Structure formats: C-alpha cells, structure tokens
Amino acid sequence: MANRLKQETSPYLLQHADNPVEWYPWGEQALTLARELDKPILLSIGYSACHWCHVMAHESFEDNEVAAIMNAHFINIKVDREERPDIDQIYQTAHSMLSNRSGGWPLTVFLTPNQEPYFTGTYFPKTSRYQLPGFADLVPRVAQFYHERKDDLVVQNSQLADALKRSIPAPSSVLSASESTLKLAFTSLERSFDFEHGGFGSAPKFPNPADITLLLHESNAGNQQAEAMVLQMLSAMANGGIYDQLGGGFCRYSVDARWNIPHFEKMLYDNAQLLFLYVDAWQISKNPHYQQVIAETITWLTREMRDSQGAFYSSLDADSKDENGHSAEGAFYIWQPAQVKALLTPEEFIVASRCLGFDRAPNFEDPHSQTQAWHPYLVQAPQDDEIDLLISAQTKLFQARDKRHHPGRDDKILTSWNALAIKGLARAGRIFNRPDWIKLAQDTVDFIYQNLWVNDALLATCKDDGNGNYHAHLNAYLDDYAYLLDALIELLQADYRSEDLAFAEDLAEALLADFESEDGGFYFTSHQHETLIHRPKQGYDNATPNGNGIAAVALQKLGHILGESRYLQASERTLKAFDSSMANNPAACASLCHALREFLTPPTLVIMRGNANKMQLWHEAINQTYYPHHLFFYFDETWDEKVRDLPPSLQRAATSDVNAWVCKGVVCSPSIDDLQNLLENL
C-alpha cells in the first residue's frame, strides 16, 4: 500500500512511496497529528543519489518488521534535502551540536511534536554493526525517552535553542576585515593543502569550489603559491577517477587521497562550479587539457542532464544494476581488463591499458560482492602518435558502457543549481567564443523565467509531470536568488539581453525586500517563509557557495553596473554582519572573502562598441587573460535598438570601428580606439 508520499513530485520521496513505513511529507498534516497525539517525530532527510540513503532504505524502511516499529512509536516524515535545504540546514546544525559529530546523509533526527530535536544520527544499520546501534532496537528506546524524560528534554531543548541563536554572528558597526583577512584565509588553506596529491586534507577529498575561487583570486593578486596550488589540484582532479574519463563530468568526491576512486554520484552543482573554475584556470595556464575537460563536461551535461525545454536535472545516482541485476555502487563505471581487451584492437588496448591504468593492480572493490575491478583514471598522457588510438579506445568503451544499466537520474529542476550551470556555461561560452554554449545558458534562464518566476517571486523547484507540464512549488531560498543574480551578471557579459538585466534588477530588489536582516546580511529563508525552530543566517561555504557571500558579490557588481548605491550599501552591511566570522575563520568564508576583495578594490567596468568583426578580435585578445575583477560589456552595430534601452551607466557613443571605455569607481577613461592601448589600461 502506498503511503502519503505518492502525491509528491520529488524523485527521492517517490522512491519511498511504497515503503511499509507510514511516511508523511513535511507539512502541517504531519506536524499537527504529532501534536494532537503527543507522538514524537522521526525525521529522515536524504536525496535520491545518496548511496547510504539507499542502503538504509533497503535494510530498514523496506522491512515490514522495522516499519511496524517506526509506525507504532513515531510520526514518520521524509524530506528531500535538495528541495528543503532550510530544514536540512537546521537539523544538520542541531546534529553537530547534540552529537559533536559532523553530519551527512541520511540524516536521522528524532523530534518532539514541536519540531525540537532530542536525538540525532546519520546512517543506522538494521541490526547493530559498524559500532552503531541497530535501528530496530534504537527506535523504541528513543520513543520511550521522549515519553519518560520530558523534564530533561525541556532543559535540553532550551539549551539547543540558545545555541542555535548563537550560531548567527553578532554584527559589527565597522568593517574590520581587510587585506590581512584575505592573507590569513590563504595561509589557512595553504596549511591544509596536500602538496603531494593536490586538494585539501586527506581522504575523502572534495572539490571545494569556493576555496579554489579564493586561490584563483589570490593568484591574480600575484600569489604564485596560490596559483600553483590551484593548477595542481585541478590537474589532479582532471587526471583522476573523480573525473569520468569516458563520458565526461565529475563525481561528488574522491574516497582516496589521489582522486582516483570516486563516490560515484554526479551532481549538477559540482559540475556547474567546476566548469567556470576550469575556464578561469585555462586563462591562467592555457592548459589544453582543461579546455578538453570543459568541452567534455558540457557534452555530458547536454547529453544526460538536460531537460527538453532547456533546464538541467539534479543528479545521477551512485548506484546502478550490475550484469547480474544487483544494485551496486559504481557498477556502471567499473571494468575488468578482459572486457576492455575484447572491445579494442591490440594497438588500442596497449595504449588504453597504459594510459588508463588497466595494466595496474585493481583499484576498486565492491563492498558487497568483494569483487575487484578497475576504474579508469589518466595514469599518463598519451604520446603524440597515440592520441588517436586513445580517443578511439575511449569512444568504444563509452559506447559499450552506454548499453549497461544506467544510474538513476533525479530529474527535478532546482533553481539554484541551474543558476550555477548558467554561470558556468556563460563564462565558458564567452571565453572560448562558443555561441552554442551561451545559448544553452540563455535557454536555462528563459526556462526559469517562464516556469519558476511566478507572481514576481522565484520558486525553488519544478518537475515535468510526463506530459510536458511543469509543476513548480516551494518558495525559493537565498541561494536561488543570489546564484541567479550572479549568473545573470555573467550572462550579460557573454551576450547582452535587456530582459536579463531587468530580471537581475527584480532579483536584487527581492533580495533586499524579502531576505535582508535588520542588522545586515540575508536570512536563508524569506520573510514570508513558514516558521521553523530556527531561521539560519550563515556565512560559511559548503559544497555550494554561501548565499550571503554570493549575494554580496552580485549586489556589488550590479551596483557598479547601474550606479545603484542601495545595492552597494546592502553588500557592505552583509560584510559587517559577518565581520566576526571572517575574522575567526576566513578560509571557511571564502565567498564572503571574495565579496570583501571586491569591496576593497571595486570591479573595473569595460564597455565596448563598434564593428562586430573587429570587436571580436578585441574580445578574443581580452579572453586570453584572467580578469576576475572586471566586468565586460560588448555592443556591436547590430545592437542599436538595444543600446537605446541601456541604463545610462552603459550608454556610450561610438566614433570609430571599435571604441572602449574603462571605468574604475566613478571615473571612466576617454574613448580608446586602439587594442594595445586598451590592454595596457586593463
């Protein structure tokens, strides 16, 4: 019998719709029932691509015995953390406070009927193992604790509420953060960097996009060590098994220090961010391998992750069925050398074995079957006369792999993650002169505007019902607005559209009206959001950049583009609100450090008008250099109609084939009609 998740649109929730557990989605029905029955809540948070979420589901949630125990003692609520990052943020923070451990997924939280957490964990096995209690034994004990120890819970809940309040930093009346803060952030990252294999810390290793951004900006300021760290890390990732050497795209993280064996789920947000970071690194290094990775990642995005109407899906699962029909992590990606040999010519096999590691010891073991296998990574680059052989081998292996059972795909469309993709595609299209990539970004913006911008407000997610109808719901969060504003500013530089600038202004106004805190900075949820036990306002980056940092960066840029002081002032208030966070741990606030750098040295605005062909030569010359603190706007003679619609800050009258104006702060240069002169001014 289907439970109450059957009517949901989230693929993750639908995965649990046939569980014998009497699941409810998060909502007033379940919360009211818990209060009326004085029954505690078992809250389970996960997402569809999560391997250990699947393991716990198979072991416990699909088990009739365990389900009966859960149903008897709790109101059971399932949450997709990608749809409800607000709920996930609150209870991940509570978990770390109650258990003194880092969180993750699945997150298992036991709540009072008033949503107050009193016991937390992540994955629990059905029966005791891994030094973890068995879930079937744990559930009734935790329920009993609620009913018998309510006085103790009152004290604990009060202490937790105070701790959550203290997680919001006290604002500062002055901005003490400075260039020294940025240097301290770099020193902290340098201290944790793995100079042998690249990346931060030891296994498991994550891409850390916000940290890479901070290092890129440090390198632009002349820090050669920062540049070396970025290039080593990105090269190690591009060569490693975390990157799909056959089909393109990056997996979530590496379980080993060498980047060779990934946790196999592929997330849109990782690939979107790495897209624009590899573009930036290419501008610094001109490494052709980076350009190859960019192109292959975009090919993967369009082949496997793109909706027919232009938006991008959320993720691919870590698990898939093996040749015996058993679900296993990484089954889609791993090989036996005999399989490889059977598909290739002898010459191809020799090159592929040496370059992709099939001639080495096996590097992957299925934890369930104990089967050893090979996951390809780039052990060494091919010689010039071997390149075609390797490409041919990779093509044949990809085609054979494509016939396997594919990993499950979460096909919901998230505004925030699509915004990151827009930014990556726009930057790649601009720097490599690929109008087709820019068009992908524009199509995604148009999709969001048509389907997720409703009554002058963003919605967070939507999904096709199978008939071409998109059902959007859930009020958008800070990240949705901030990432999309940031992405539109990037897209305007790739191909200016007046409607994109108007959309950006609408988003900026909504940020100020619906999210800004009275003492600076932005809440994660809007002022109209449902009341939860805590309203987060955070400054730290996670797998995705911090919304306050990106909002501050984007508002500063838009403020300089339009000459709008309100946006600049809101950005400054944000920096003051998180002044203590940056002072105490600047490396954890990399996005805010980016905003601080832009505040200390405002971006340079470059406006160009003229003949399309000649201006393209200027464009290509500029793209050879990394300019992270410049904003470029190109208007050729075909733009006359749109030029009349430009805000006054961007209006200029062309007098020769190509004219450029360089504006720093409130001072703009005279018209420049010589490319070399322009490059010197930049």
Image (tube, rainbow, N blue to C red):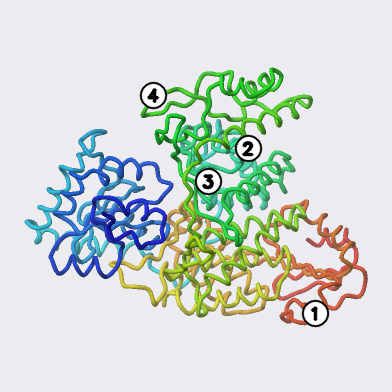
Instruction: Specify the amino acid type for callout 1.
Output: Glu
Residue 584 percent location from the top left of the image: 42, 55
Instruction: Specify the amino acid type for callout 4.
Output: Gln
In space, the residues marked 1 and 3 are separated at their CA atoms by: 50 Å
Residue 161 percent location from the top left of the image: 25, 64
Q: Which residue is mark 2?
A: 235
Q: Which residue is mark 3?
A: 187
In space, the residues marked 4 and 3 are separated at their CA atoms by: 42 Å
| Mark toward the viewer: 1 or 3 | 1
Which residue is depicted at the point 24% across and 60% down?
A: 160
Q: Which mark is residue 641?
A: 1
Is residue 203 in sight in this rendering?
no
| Mark toward the viewer: 4 or 3 | 4
In space, the residues marked 2 and 4 are separated at their CA atoms by: 31 Å
* Labelled pair 3, 2 in contact (Cβ < 8 Å): no
- Choose between 371 and 655: the one closer to the eye: 371
| 608 sits left or right of 187 in the view | right
Q: Earlier in the sequence, mark 3 or mark 2?
A: 3
Q: Earlier in the sequence, mark 1 or mark 4?
A: 4
Q: Which residue is mark 4?
A: 370
